[in-house]
Image (tube, helix red, strand yellow):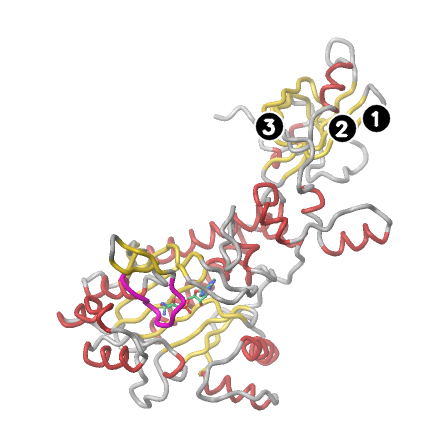
Amino acid sequence: GRKWTDIGALTEELKDQQVLIRGRAQTIRAVGKNIAFLVVRKKGFTVQCVLTVQNDVVSRQMVKFATGLSRESHVDIEGIVSVPDTPIKGASQQVEVQVRKIYCVSKAVPNLPINIEDAARSEIEIEKALQAGEQLVRVNQDTRLNYRVLDIRTAANQGIFRIQCQVENIFRQFLLSEGFVGIHTPKLIAGSSEGGSAVFKLDYKGQAACLAQSPQLHKQIAICGDFDRVFEIGPVFRAEDSYTHRHLCEFTGLDVEMEIEEHYFEVMDVVDRLFVAMFDSLNENFKKELEAIGKQYPFEPLKYLRKTLRLTFEEGVKMLQDAGVNVDPLGDLNTEAERKLGQLVLEKYGTEFYILHRYPLAVRPFYTMPCYDDQTYSNSFDVFIRGEEIISGAQRVHVPELLTARAEACGIDVKTISTYIDSFRYGAPPHGGFGVGLERVVMLFCALNNIRKTSLFPRDPLRLAP
Ligand code: 4AD
């Protein structure tokens, strides 16, 4: 086993026991020459460590050494756990460590570009501190991202990326339990897969190529290849022009594709079961992480129903129109209309998670299956959390002639996707699927205001480093 005790595991039960901890010296404070306080942090948890000069145990030199350490230096500390009479402020753990030995494992430079304590404060705490006349620097987003190595040390960020890992994990576990197979499709491809121009172009040994905008075409080919249910977790590249709170140039796509027996509703059923299971599991098993996030970025738990609400696009348009919002019944909803509809749905149905389906065909990608009864509409859907899109999905066209016609009608150079279209000439089952943006799910589940908060090293139109 490990010889170190996790800082998060330091509780009253360990009173009077000797422990060895490793962490970072978050703050260092001297009281005269005989006493020093160190707040030591690891994985978002903090504990106060006390050095008090005592014959044979702690020398003045040790206290001097400790107070001379730079913030964020890595230290090993051996000490005895004690329980103070008064509550400890400024540390997550309610016990102290009476230091016997201290080693500096790795020194940090003395002037850090970000003070972790400041970076970890909530807006409310910052306002209070400023009103109390405290000197503090508000850490802006660019500074945080420039020094991400420091920024991700805050408790909220530690929570965010542990939640992200779980969203991915639950996605995988759930789909495996329903008979899906995990696949990986190429990220270097010949042309655009979603249509449109938002692709990163590159030179593939003399041949024009681009970074995959989605695994769309290849996950469908896998279905034609007799894998009747597949999923993929992988990078997705979009050469976005706009600098918004919810678009990245590289994000993690969670993709699903499956054979359909009769109806595209079967695909929405998977979304329903998967996400209700995911939200339940996050709420039940990741309370600590959600709490750490909420402490810095307060949010209300997501409201969702046991059986996910489904509205048709027409119904959604009607709700908006009844509320006095001007929308084109055959156009797409803009961000503002989506938000507004989210509010209306919450008021009427009490949920912040719902599916909108049967979109107008004209606003969907070329591979989307038109409705059998009315070709103005399509067998497609989007899924929303708190009024913002996290998923789009649909039944696909599996008839090669119709697929070619649809691609041409959408202005796509059919030559670049000929192997894809050919895949449907050897017998292709009806199928459908969906794509989820991982960073969006985490952002919206925790009601965060910017997707850069849920991407470890975000790539946006202005950022390629770190
Ligand atoms: O809506 P999109 O573009 O759909 C597809 O890629 C389809 N192939 C999916 C399918 O199977 N039909 O992207 C799917 C999801 C969006 O709902 C959104 O959550 C996320 O990917 N997404 C982005 N996330 C961050 N930055 C961007 N630029 C994103 N673009 C889409």
191 inside magenta stretch: yes
Q: What stretch is highlighted in magenta?
A: 190-199
Q: Which residue lies furthest to the left in this view?
A: 426
Type of amino acid under label 2: Phe
Q: Is residue 279 left or right of residue 407?
A: right
On residue 37, the disc is 2
Q: Position of residue 349 (x, y in %)?
A: 56, 78
2 and 3 marks in contact (CB < 8 Å): no
Which residue is under mark 3? 22
Type of amino acid under label 1: Val
Q: Quadrant of residue 431?
A: bottom left
Give the mark nearest the N terminus, 1 or 2.
1
Q: Is mark 1 on a helix, strand or loop?
A: strand
1 and 2 marks in contact (CB < 8 Å): yes
Please count the marks in the image: 3
10 Å crowding of disc 3: few (<14), some (14-19), many (20+):
many
Q: Residue furthest front?
A: 206
310 inside magenta stretch: no
Q: Where is residue 383 in the image (x, y as percent from the top left)?
A: 46, 71
Q: Which of 19 and 429 is in front in this view?
A: 429
Real-space Cα distance between discs 2 and 3? 16 Å
Give the mark nearest the N terminus, 2 or 3.
3
Q: Nearer the viewer, residue 410 or 157?
A: 410
Q: Position of residue 145 (x, y in %)?
A: 58, 49
Q: Where is residue 160 in the image (x, y as percent from the top left)?
A: 56, 51
